[in-house]
Image: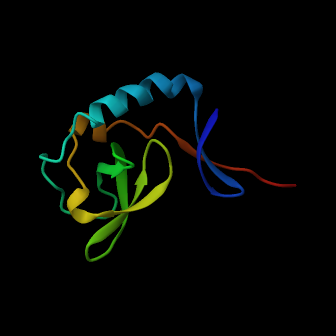
Amino acid sequence: MISSATKDENVYWVYKKTSLPDLVDMLKALNEINSSIKSVKPLLDFVCAAPFKGEWYRAKIIKIFEDAAVVRFLDYGNECRVKLDELRLIPKELVSKPPLVSCQKILLI
């Protein structure tokens, strides 16, 4: 298991090493998306593509503001505020794939 993001000191987003090829394939497919693809109408829990540091990633909308949304990147676990006009539709086959990370809590005894 590899940690991709932390929510706090006891909560981590992790993925299996065996998921790395799937992650690479997902990133290739998403980064073929460009800014000419249609923007999305923001809805809570909607899965779309969102930019982060110049690349495109699968994201779920978790909070909506007047001009932006907070998204959780499905294959990493981190969250980011993104302008609404930067969100893009992605093909159904990418929407239906399960997230490549899972949230793990560490219990301190």
- Residue projecting furthest to the right: 109
- Residue projecting furthest to the front: 54
- Which residue occupies the foreground of this view, 53 or 61? 53
Q: How many marks?
A: 0
Q: Is residue 89 left or right of residue 50?
A: left
Residue for point 71% across, 56% down: 10
- Residue projecting furthest to the bottom: 66
- Which residue occupies the foreground of this view, 67 or 101? 67
Residue for point 50% across, 49% down: 77
Seen in the picture, residue 61 relative to 63 is either above or below; the reply is above
Across and down, in percent, residue 45 comes to 34, 59
Q: Is residue 39 left or right of residue 13?
A: left
- Look at the image and tell me whether residue 42 can be seen: no
Across and down, in percent, residue 38 comes to 12, 51
Please identify the quarter of the rendering in which residue 56 is found.
top left
In what quadrant of the picture does the C terminus appear?
A: bottom right
Residue for point 45% across, 22% down: 21
- Look at the image and tell me whether residue 3 can be seen: yes
